[in-house]
Amino acid sequence: MALPVRDQLKYWGIAAFIFFVALWYLGHVLLPFILGGAIAYFLDPVADRLETAGLSRTAATVVITLCGLLVFSFAALAIVPMLVNQTISLINTVPQLISDLQIFVATNFPSVSTPDSVIHRSLVSVGTVIQERGGELLQGVLNSALSVINVLMLLVIVPVVAFYLLLDWDRLIREINRLLPRDHVSVISTLFLEIDKTLASFVRGMGTVCLILGTYYAVALMIVGLQFGLVVGFIAGLVTFIPYLGALIGGALAIGLALFQFWGDWFTIGMVFGVFAAGQIVEGNFLTPKLVGKSVGLHPVWLLIALSVFAALFGFVGMLVAVPVAAAIGVLAKFLAGQYMSSSLYLGFESKNQNKD
């Protein structure tokens, strides 16, 4: 005989509580495993296609791993050093940019640039803090033994976890399905399939969009001649999964840097603006409709709430699990809304009359 619904809710509530407590206290320990699981989930369709082409699961996993190592090696040797150098240069240049901004404000808006004005004091304060602490903070982060150890652990553990999870992904799914409560296996399986569909559309599709747009912004801005084009493109691509935010942040940063670098050369500044305008047109009309689709079900406001709450509660690990949890909650909310719409609580007397007939 099945357990009463109240008891089932109690036990599942305890399980959810244990999960969030573990995430709270062991987030830094779980980070490599969460990243490895995300990589395995992202690459599982590739492994399935290779299996369809005739390879065994082991051979498919080895091929994907070798390709991933080649891509990672290229990025580590060619892209990452350039990105780090541009980031350091940008931090070192910020005090000079603020000084130039002070001169620009003093020249064009003398009424607000007096020594007693709020704008003048703010600019002086920001410039002083960045000049004193910016380089020191960056140097401390780069030279921290703990940071080096954490990076090494990620570089070693994440690929190993991803390899074994990708190798055993189908078997793992079968084992999870076998452990589901038999009374609710069909409903839970349907919900899991819907969650997987949502995640596949959003994570895989949006991840591809972010990669394409980040590469486009970086290459285009470097061709235009923007000094920190790679960093700006990386930042813009990273936050593209939230509609308009990537273009807004990246565009503001790029145009701000372009104003200081190309002041008076309005054609080049217009080209920087055009890069982001073209990116938004392509993303909105071609990339997102083709790669993500229109029925993902994750509203941008819901994503922002989930990211903010999970980042505040669980840090960086919380940001990683925010999207899957938001997708799961969204699917469950739709399911519960459907159950409510078909219940007598919603239908009222109409439902009772239909039952009598």
Image (cartoon, rainbow, N blue to C red):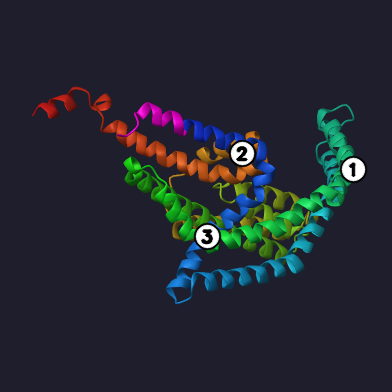
At which x and y percent is residue 20? Answer: 57, 35
Note whether 330 is above or below 356 in the view shown. below
Where residue 131 is drawn, which disc sits there? 1
Q: Nearer the viewer, residue 162 or 236?
A: 162
Q: Nearer the viewer, residue 158 or 196?
A: 158
Instruction: Residue 254: say if magenta.
Output: no
Note whether 267 is above or below 17 in the view shown. below
Label 1: state its secondary structure: helix
According to the picture, the residue beneath numbered tag 2 turns out to be 23
Q: Nearer the viewer, residue 184 or 314?
A: 184
The quarter of the picture where the N terminus appears is top left
Q: Amino acid at mark 2?
A: Leu
Per the rendered image, the range of residues in magenta is 1-12
Asked if labels 3 and 1 touch by Cβ distance under 8 angstroms, the answer is: no
Sort mark 3 into few (<14), some (14-19) or many (20+) by Cα contacts within 10 Å.
Answer: few
Q: Amino acid at mark 1?
A: Gln
Query: Residue placed farthest to the bottom in the image?
Result: 54
What is the CA distance from the residue labelled 3 to the residue labelled 2?
38 Å
At which x and y percent is residue 283? Answer: 52, 57
At which x and y percent is residue 144? Answer: 85, 48
Q: Nearer the viewer, residue 168 or 217?
A: 168
Residue 126 visible (yes or no): yes
Note whether 160 is above or below 95 in the view shown. below
Asked if labels 2 and 3 touch by Cβ distance under 8 angstroms, the answer is: no
Residue drawn at x 59%, y 40% is 307
Q: Amino acid at mark 3?
A: Val
Give left or right: position of 165 versus 261.
left
According to the picture, the residue beneath numbered tag 3 turns out to be 282
Residue drawn at x 78%, y 59% is 227
